[in-house]
Structure formats: structure tokens, C-alpha cells
Image: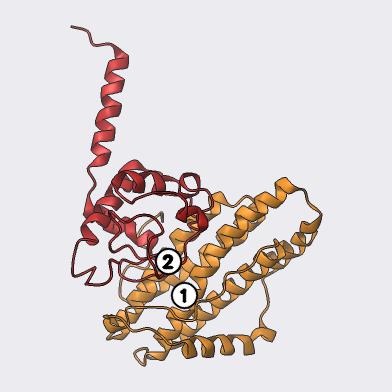
Amino acid sequence: MKIPFAVCIGVMVVASLCHAADGDAGKGAQIYQRCLACHSLEHNRSGPRHCGLFGRPAAALPDFTYSQALKSAGLTWDAVTLDRFLENPLKAVPGTKMAYAGVKNAQERADLIAYLKQATHDPAKCPEGSSR
Amino acid sequence: MSSTTPQASTTTAARRSFLSGFGKFTLSATAIALLAGRDRLALIGSAEAKTAGNDVTILNAALAAEQEAIAAYQVGASSGLLQKPVLDLAVQFQGHHKEHATALATTVKKLGGTPVAAKAKYTFPVEKLKTQADVLSFAAELERGAVSAYLGAIPILDDRELAKVAASILGDEAMHWAVLRQALGLPPVPSAFVS
């Protein structure tokens, strides 16, 4: 039985996307090092802290000054919204203060999001009080 | 709270120290040429002004990170954990960040923007800094992040001359990172590419 070429390509693309969705938190920890000039897990820096990120509405930390654009974005941070934002922050939320070209590689974004998910649920990295 | 925050007085002292040296500060030839070219900004059209506005946002993000790096090096230098010649190195690197911050703030103004102000207080994980190696690791972490931040800013700067200056700063931060890694006994240049 012959399988059409287009179907093969389609399967490969879907398989690639599915693979990209399985992030490696260990690799994500390395990628997170790129973020450390402006962010940390526990403390606000020139960018907001990441503890408590998942499930938090964008621009919701009371002790950080966000752009009006992010305040108005109506986003809640999860794997999907983070993936879209991290790919190209300025395109996802025009006017954001996160002036960064983005993490263009889908697998790297998946790894980074996997790390963020793991680290922000780790009490050793995000002690009481750092998530609000 | 598990962290210590440098007080505003520390930042103020650092700023005062910086300002006292302002008369001695000189922009690089590249930055001077760049900044001189920006004087025509008031005469340009709205499309170019919008472009300048994008660049202002990017430069202000870099400026905020530079200001934080200055404060972080102040914490390191004041910690009593750094011994000469490492202490001298930290002070020198802090001086570079001050130069970067001044150049960025000046450029933001020339572009018609308002430079972001340094925070009155920064929060660093001081409770985790027990040894010279801890301080160096923290500084290396910041410098490594700064390299990536500039790498992420350069492609989206509309003005290619500004991108050139940002690349110049990136080179300096990468050297800081390498020297700090060397001081920690790590391979100073861990890979052929940075990301």
C-alpha cells in the first residue's frame, strides 16, 4: 500500500510537534540561564519572579511594575500561553517591556517550560511567600 | 524572608561614587559617533520616530539590567568575601556596567525617551553568598544572562548602529563571564556558540 507523500510529511510534522511538547526540565535548566540577567525564580529583578507562574494571570504580581500592554493582555500563564509568548514576546504582546527576540526553537521552549513548571513547584526553589 | 536586600543607602553610595567619577567618564568612539547622529531625531518623520520608540523600549530593558548588575557588584564588593585581586576585578567590571548604563541612558534620551531609573532597592540572594566562590558564581550567572539578553536584543533593534553598540557591550559581558568562570576554575569558554 502506498502512502501519499503529503500524508507522510503531515505525520512527521505532527510527530515533531508532539515531541516538542515533551520538554526536558534538565535541558530547560540550562536554557533558563539565558533569562538570569532579568529574572530569577524567587525574587523580582528587572523582570518579575517566576515562582507561582503557572496559573497566574499575566501582570498580577502586586510588587512588580508591568507594562500597560501586559496588564491588558488578558493572559493566564500556562504551557500554551508561555510557549506563544516566549517564541516572540514583542509579537505576542506588543508593548511588553520584555525586549527580547524570543526562544525560536520549539523544543527549547518546551524544555524551558518543563523546567519552569518543575522549578516553580519545588519548595526548595520557591519557598513560602515567593509565589504570590 | 530568605534574602537580604541592599538598602537604598548602599545604592545611593554606589551612585554617588559613580557620579563623582562622571567627569572622568568617556564614551567610546563608536558610542560618540552614534549619539551625535541621533541629534537629528527631532527632524525625522513619524515612521522613524515609531522605530526609535521600539529601540527605546529595548535599550531601557538593557539599562534596567545594567543598573541591577551595578547593584549586584556593589553587594559583592561590599560583602567582605572578595580578596584581591578578585575584588579589583569585580570593581572594574562594575565600572564597565556603569559605562554601559550611562551610554544606554544617554542614547535613550537622545532618542526622545525617558531612561528607566535605578530601583531604590534590589533583592539578591545574599544569604546564599558565603564564600568568594559563591559571589563569583552569582556574578557569572548574571553575566551569562546578560550575554543572552543582548543576544536577544540585537536582532530586534531597528537601528543597526545601535545594534553594533549593543554587540560591543555583549562582547564585554562575555569577557566578564569568561574571566569569572576562569576564576572559579571552570573552562572559561564552555562552547563555541552562546545562546
- At label 2, counting other C-alpha atoms closer than 10 Å, the crowd grade (few under 14, some 14-19, many 20 or more) is many
Q: Tell me the number on the disc at residue A37.
A: 2
- At label 1, counting other C-alpha atoms closer than 10 Å, the crowd grade (few under 14, some 14-19, many 20 or more) is many
Q: Relative to B16, is B97 above or below?
A: above
Q: Is residue B98 left or right of residue A62?
A: right
Per the image, the residue denoted by label 1 is B69
User: Residue at left 54%, top 52%?
Assistant: A95
Instruction: Indicate the chain coloured red by its letter.
Output: A
Q: Position of residue B6 (x, y in %)?
A: 41, 85
- Residue A46 can be seen, yes or no: yes
> Mark 1 and 2 residues: CB-CB less than 8 Å, in contact?
yes
Q: Is residue A22 left or right of residue A86?
A: left
- Coloration mode: by chain
Instruction: Indicate the chain coloured orange by its letter.
Output: B
Q: Secondary structure at mark 1?
A: helix
Q: Relative to A4, is A109 above or below?
A: below
Return the chain for callout 1: B
